[in-house]
Image: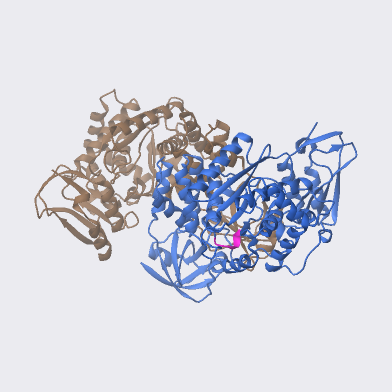
Chain colours: A brown, B blue
Amino acid sequence: MALYLRTKKLDIEAGDDLVVLLNNKQAEQEGIKEGQKITIFYHQQVIYATVHQTDTEMETGELGMYSELWQTYDIPSGEILRVEIPERPDSIDYIKKKLLGYRLNKNEIYTITKDISNRRIKDIEVAYFMSSFFSPGFNDEEVVNIAEGMAAAGDIIDFTEGKKGTHVVDKHSIGGIAGKGVTPILVPIVSATGLLIPNTSTRAITSPAGTSDILETVMPVAFEDGEVQQIVKKENACMIWGGSLKLAPADDVMISVERSLHAQSFNKLVASIVAKKIAMGINHVLIDIPYGKGAKVKDAEEANKLGEKFVEIFEKVDIDCFPFKRLIKGTDGLGIGPNLEMRDVLRVLERDELRPKFLEESALQMAGKVIEMGKKAAPGKGYEMARSILESGKALEKFWAIGKTQGATKIIKSEEIKPGEYIKEVVADFDGKISFVDNKMIVRIARALGTPFIKQAGIYFHKTLGDNVKKGDRLMTLYSVGNERVEDGYSIVDFKKLYNIT
Amino acid sequence: MALYLRTKKLDIEAGDDLVVLLNNKQAEQEGIKEGQKITIFYHQQVIYATVHQTDTEMETGELGMYSELWQTYDIPSGEILRVEIPERPDSIDYIKKKLLGYRLNKNEIYTITKDISNRRIKDIEVAYFMSSFFSPGFNDEEVVNIAEGMAAAGDIIDFTEGKKGTHVVDKHSIGGIAGKGVTPILVPIVSATGLLIPNTSTRAITSPAGTSDILETVMPVAFEDGEVQQIVKKENACMIWGGSLKLAPADDVMISVERSLHAQSFNKLVASIVAKKIAMGINHVLIDIPYGKGAKVKDAEEANKLGEKFVEIFEKVDIDCFPFKRLIKGTDGLGIGPNLEMRDVLRVLERDELRPKFLEESALQMAGKVIEMGKKAAPGKGYEMARSILESGKALEKFWAIGKTQGATKIIKSEEIKPGEYIKEVVADFDGKISFVDNKMIVRIARALGTPFIKQAGIYFHKTLGDNVKKGDRLMTLYSVGNERVEDGYSIVDFKKLYNIT
């Protein structure tokens, strides 16, 4: 059956789903039920949407569109569109097959990732698929197919202008640590060597700030495919938000389904990252795997396993991967929150004496390794090259060159970046040496202060890992834009959970 | 935080979910996002609903209610209700724990079943739980806790008026076979012996008609708890639709989530049935397990396993269970579809010569066994008692006694029941003996004819299992209420898939 319905924009946001509203009688006539998916044809696009029904809000012949639908596909009111009831998607049978413990072949997996990408299957069905990452699980070949299938369902960008053998490098962290300063220091250093490094980052999901959130305090980060090509052509680098590109779009749907469970399996984490690197045409990637108490990865053994998994899966898609495993006992940087983290980054690039040394060291080690992977330095020589680029001021220069190409209107000095005006000092009631700072507690405090949405909110450490503390010492300053927020953050501070003191 | 919002009824049906519409600005102020759950307090009830947002359709201070919400809880417009953002439910952590392969204890399972029952957790999260029935799976103790937890979250009815030791019997089929005539024949026979048999049945989900659908052609089947107590007090039996009672309400949510996958694990099937029997205070139950090609259970081995599973789980909740396993090679009865199945039932009860003998035999065997379980006949003597009750006309009398107490306005004769006026004859183009009739094909044809929604639609077999057929013989008559429907059904008929001929 095919129906022809007249579109009507509605002002209702349903969340992640695309929803249409149909007249009850018409729906009944066509055998359509609430909650069912229908197919809408608009220009070249096939759109799958969930049906809600009404007696009075829609006339027969009308197709009410919730905000996400008409916004995503830019559909005006008054268009006559063809609407069909889709056949039951094969992907549902494949998901069932997996739940029953069978292996899925490439075709089956590509069908699933495609149907998730274009929202042909419902969130409930995606949840069944996501749960199968935990149990019964996927083998390496399946994970490779999932990653490739996710990439294939979206745009794949080639930055080499067709030149085979061009090194395209990147660095990616599995996350879980507060402080995202490494990437904005590493990208300018690496690109200063001439290497292609089209970096995409994320906004915060569970952390106080994503790399995109902190970059955005000083430069635009949201671009479309064509714009990114121009930026990278000019700067042989970019530092952009991956979410604005159509890279592996299945991942956005999967993440929204995983969010409610607050859990992601390692295979899913690997598949997502691999998919996005395929889509960006990366051929060498350093994967930052922080591990330790409070991190995503608990110990060295788990970090080794995950690192091997990354190497194996990346190898199967012809991407050279270096797992950079590091034991984490605190945060990356002294500032936490978008503005405070960007101030740390600029202090490192500007060679300011207040710069966080631990963050600088991490960034240099990773940058050095990436430079070696891109063959701009001999093995073991990358670190020195990275350090000399940083110390010479070339990294600072490159940071702002990329920033300006991305649309930053002016160069901002670290001292110009201001945290929130409402502050609260956290003072020690103990003596001893800080031998551990818990990232999870820091995240909770920063969230209460208002990060990542309030850019000026955050934490600045006066004492951190390795420091000796005396009773009465200032440990941290909490910043936000209102007194209640600052008090909220302060009320969560609990030294017993936050520190190990030796 | 607690908000006080003024309710406003909306005319939008979202399907299975309860949805509220909030003004965007207000939602943002309170940190509420689209797709999130909020808690609404109305009289003694705590209601969980999913948030949609709008700029213009709602004012600040208003709480738009989609139809399912105000209908289910009977909430008028203009009420000022307290609304809160719920804490993250513990059940999500327990579901995650299960997906990671751990066993769940009683408290964890009860928390999950309760949160599913009252819709505190989202359908996506329910899907994660349902997928864990497939993998990693639940052990018997967990299945018992799921069944008891499902029952405990709803109403539990006691029909014994507190008399300990009273036998309360029932029969339940795992389903999957076209033709639902057994129960409406069995209940009057068993209740004629004086046994308490408060039977609840379902409407069709995937079959041409559920037992409730066929009963409803001659008597009301939807009642509330108190009404059922009255019916059973008078008739020591009832034949009602379980869906109108609040028995194990988690099951309705689970079924709606399972529906999209078109699959149910055995443990889930067992848990659902056990939960509902606990809720109805049953202490002896016969479980009909049809098996064979095209059925839910493939072979005798699987039927034995499932039967043992039922016995074990029922034993742990102190219910005596008899698994009635039977090899199925065709349908139960000669008519398929609500009216045609009820005509079969009445023909058996009326001792009409056109009555389907196979259906009668199945009903008598099961009724006999149930009578023995309820100690009204010695082992091996139940069948004879059942047959004499049927042949004496007492079963017919009891059927209508129950029917009248349930509100039937008149006694209907089998000959008064008319199938649809549009017909199509299916004629054999082969010779041979029918040694198998495929239930799945029959279901597809019946569905195309319009069952279960069109009561007059259906199939009547002139030749069936065991019959010898000659080219040109009339095999089936297809009935519906329009020519297109009849042709639709006819177009699906495929003798190769429908029959085995020997």
In the image, taking residue B113 as reference, residue A193 lies left or right, namely left
**Does A362 sit above or below residue B313?**
above
Q: Is residue A97 magenta?
A: no
Indicate the position of residue B310 as horizontal and vertical percent values.
55, 44
- Taking the view exactly as shown, the residue that stands out farthest to the bottom is B78
Indicate the position of residue A122 as horizontal and vertical percent values.
55, 49
Residue occupying image coordinates x 35% and y 34%? A287
Residue occupying image coordinates x 57% and y 60%? B14
In the image, taking residue B146 as reference, residue B357 lies left or right, namely right
Q: How many marks?
A: 0
**Does A298 sit above or below residue B409?**
above
Indicate the position of residue B141 as horizontal and vertical percent values.
45, 45
- Taking the view exactly as shown, the residue that stands out farthest to the front is B378
**Does A233 sit above or below residue B487?**
above
The answer to which of B46 and A485 lies nearer the viewer is B46
Q: Is residue B244 magenta?
A: yes
The answer to which of A130 and B249 lies nearer the viewer is B249
Residue A106 visible in rendering: yes
Residue B208 visible in rendering: no
- Taking the view exactly as shown, the residue that stands out farthest to the top is A378
Which residues lie in the magenta part? Answer: B242-246
Indicate the position of residue A298 as horizontal and vertical percent values.
30, 38
Q: Quadrant of the C terminus of chain A?
A: top left
Q: Is most of the magenta stretch helix, strand or loop?
A: helix
